[in-house]
Image (cartoon, helix red, strand yellow):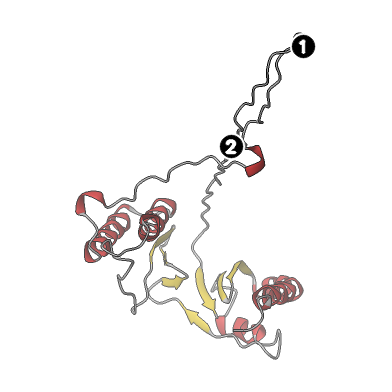
Amino acid sequence: MGAPTSGLLTEFFLQHLEQLHIPHLSSKHRIIKYFRYVDDILIIYDTNHSDVQNILKDFNTIHPKLEFTAECEENNQINFLDITINRTHTDWRIAIYRKPTFTDTIIPYTSNHPTQHKYATIRFLYNRLDTYNLQDDDYNTEISTIQNILQNNAFPIHNHKPPPLQAHTLTHPENRRQPRTRTPQHTNGPPSHTSAKKPPLLQTYSRKQTKSRSGPTTPYKTY
């Protein structure tokens, strides 16, 4: 399996190489945008000023142990991670991408698993659907795909969306409220009792989603 730190060290190494070489290569080939997730890279460039084979040749000179291959767009579209990027004359359009080997198998509703485990996949599918900026027809297609996945895994038709997560209050064991201990009343002073601090509340945070668009260019990815 390798050392637990191997993934972290690999990321350090790749980021180091990016800082050394990517600014120069971007300037040389007029690369508009460079994106990387682990070992998947998406490059957006202008075909009037750059050639994909020349870019690939220079990338393969970065390090002798690294070998890059290029997958160019076909019919003005390319797949990157879990999205399909479609290039039009004036805009970009994305859709959910699934590999040809995709199966709709998730934890069945009839399985003897905790409810939160069974609904975890559904939450992911709906969160992704609501997060990505999809066109109406792509949005409706994804809704149908999700419903088919749930039906094929015996989820009730009337309850496709997962139940809301329940909020809980986290309390440190030392801060739990203790029962009051009363003492006999004394003539020289008031009765004494023990008190407990209020438990800390669980806070939630949300991150704002930003969307950006750029002009028509030709993307390709290397991996």
Image height check: is 156 above or below 71?
A: above
Q: Percent x, y for residue 32?
A: 60, 66
Question: Is residue 102 left or right of 91 when viewed as pictured?
Answer: left
Residue shown at the point (65%, 87%) measured from the top left: 66
Which amino acid, by three-letter code, is at mark 2?
A: Leu
The residue most toward the right is: 188
Element under disc 2: loop
Q: Nearer the viewer, residue 94 or 30?
A: 94
Secondary structure category for the residue under label 1: loop
Q: Position of residue 86 (x, y in %)?
A: 40, 66
In the image, what residue occupies the spot 67% across and 27% down? 195
Query: How many marks do you count on the picture?
Result: 2
Q: Is residue 67 above or below residue 182?
A: below
Label 1 and label 2: CA atoms lie apart by 36 Å
Instruction: State left or right for residue 174 relative to residue 205.
Output: right
Q: Is residue 70 above or below residue 81?
A: below
Query: Residue 196 in the image: x percent, y percent?
Result: 66, 30
Closer mark to the observer between disc 1 and disc 2: 1
- Disc 1 residue type? Gly
Q: Residue 46 bears which disc, if any?
A: none
Q: Residue at x 40, y 63 (%)?
A: 88
Front residue of this view, candidates 25 and 122: 122
Q: Is residue 71 above or below residue 127?
A: below
Rendering quarter of residue 74: bottom left
Nearest to N terminus: mark 1 or mark 2: 1
x, y percent for residue 29:
65, 75
The residue carrying pointer 1 sits among few (fewer than 14), some (14 to 19) or many (20 or more) residues within 10 Å by Cα, namely few
Give the residue at mark 1: 189
Q: Quadrant of the N terminus?
A: bottom right
Which residue sits at x=37%, y=76%?
99
Location of the C terminus (image quadrant): bottom right
Give the residue at mark 2. Answer: 201
